[in-house]
Amino acid sequence: MSTDKKLRSYDWFGKSDKMGFVHRSWLRNQGYPDDYFQGRPVIGICNTWSELTPCNGHLRDFAEVVKRGVIEAGGFPLEFPVTSLGETIMRPTTMLFRNLAAMDTEESIRANPLDGIVLLTGCDKTTPSTLMGACSVDLPTIVVPGGPMLNGRYKGECVGSGSFNWLIKEKQKVALYSDADIHAMEIGAARSQGHCMTMGTASTMACMVEALGLTLPGAAAIPAVDSRKKVMAQLSGRRIVEMVKEDLTLSKILTRKAFENAIVVNAAVGGSTNFIIHLLAIAGRLGVELNLDDFDAIGSKIPLLLNLKPSGKYLMEDFYYAGGLPVVLKEMQQYLHNEVMTVNGRPIGENSGEAACYNDDVIATVDKPIQNESGIAVLRGNLCEQGAIIKPSAASPELMKHRGRAVVFETIEDYHQRIDDPDLDIDETCVIVLKGVGPKGYPGMPEVGNVDLPEKILRKGIRDMVRISDGRMSGTAAGTVVLHVSPESAVGGTLALVQDGDMIELDVENRRLHLDISEQELQDRRAAWVPPAPMATRGYVKLYIDHVQQAHLGADLDVLRGGSGSEVTRDLH
Ligand code: FES
């Protein structure tokens, strides 16, 4: 299929007037021959490379490989940088800047003479942010996920990035590891270029874009340093040129059914809870109807097929050797909309038709899954009028129904100050309540929901307690952790009104989260509630606080929902 539609870039390079001269002439300083300006599709390679984003540190090389493919297919590649978000480095949290990066991506695409886009992504926020921005422009777009690191290794043991950090944090408290041990782990957990190699948020995002049909088949699991990753990048460069000719835009691929597929696949792979907030934001950019309850209705009864850390045994490298995501897609065909179109021009069901599993201990079958039910449970109740979430597969079965006394921390700093105080009145039956870590309250909704247990409880050998917050949780973490409570405490949600000693009831099976105080008491507390002082009075952070939406809507800025298309009505004069 090809269309005779005029290339968008023609409006820049095809003109014979003064501005056509200007557009071409300055670009020629990089040495492009005449034919580059004469009808070649111009492909923007949107690169989140940054030395400050370690997981994306190899993407400069990848851009060159993508360019090879674009040129082979007759396109004109132009690489451009966008805001990159390094999860392990940026303060106070990359989530504060996801929408900024999305805005940067959107405007960079729209303002330039681009016909098609390749998104080079990797670390947690770099995939959703660039995709959100690209959706608001809606050009033909393909994603090249940068790939996971090789498996972490330490003293003969396979260690997952992120997951092991939590273990170290806990075990440090009971002094099982020496400083030398931890130093060795620090190196052993990051053996190659690439993003976290557990089924954390970056791997989840890579699976998400493949399940949405936005990558070439099999792209998600290939390790960053495997030569086949570069082959995938080159082929993606070739393919985007054809996509421009076919006018295969994002909105033609990202239908409601594609989002439903992504929810099914995320449950089957045991993906991160961050998937929810990012998928909601992406759908919001396209005007696709998707809400929090869809994640429970579509995903919560899906069998878990992947035996990957943080909850399982293996890592992304093993997943790739076992056959990668196409095996999951093939196995899940009975749950998927197999007719949904993908970037290679074929339906997703056809793409996975040939997939073969090479290790069923890594990728299980629907008939014999790792767990019968995976996915996300969406909770409701007076403590979360707009919803909250929990990942049952990462939680302790014995805590899924629990009534406990609240121990409240007003901020994350308050938590750090008091959690290990020997005099803190807390035991393992209590519920840890953390406020002030939502989108507006922190601001930026950090991954702190899985706060550590008090040292005195860890010393008893106890590893899990019910924890509730308006924040997020790292995809590499686990526990009976209720997250994304909406409305958040900073805007006066019921979470703001919880006090030490209140009883809280969690009932995951019945999807209930309840603060057990009288309606009158609740009203009195609400009337007496004083909003916190604004966390910023200027700059991007003020803009963010003023416009960010609540977690159940995807925490995008209200002014960024929807799209403005690719047209720019005013010329450069
Ligand atoms: Fe970048 Fe985990 S820190 S993917």
Image (spheres, rainbow, N blue to C red):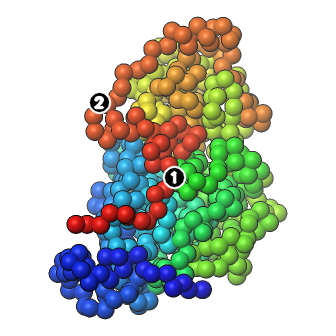
Residue at 69 percent of width and 31 percent of height: 380
Circle 2 residue:
537
Is residue 44 found left or right of 554 in the rendered image? left
Circle 1: element type: loop
**Image location of residue 158, percent across then percent down:** 52, 60
Is residue 394 found left or right of 209 in the rendered image? right
Circle 1 residue:
562
Residue at 56 percent of width and 30 percent of height: 487
- Residue 341 lies, with reference to residue 234, above or below; the image says above
Question: Toward the viewer: 448 or 307?
Answer: 448
**Image location of residue 143, percent across then percent down:** 49, 69
- Residue 100 lies, with reference to residue 433, above or below; the image says below
What is the crowding at mark 1: few (fewer than 14 residues within 10 Å), some, or many (at least 20)?
A: some
**Image location of residue 37, percent across then percent down:** 31, 86
Is residue 105 found left or right of 554 in the rendered image? left
Q: Quadrant of residue 328?
A: bottom right
Q: Would residue 84 be visible to someone looking at this image?
A: no
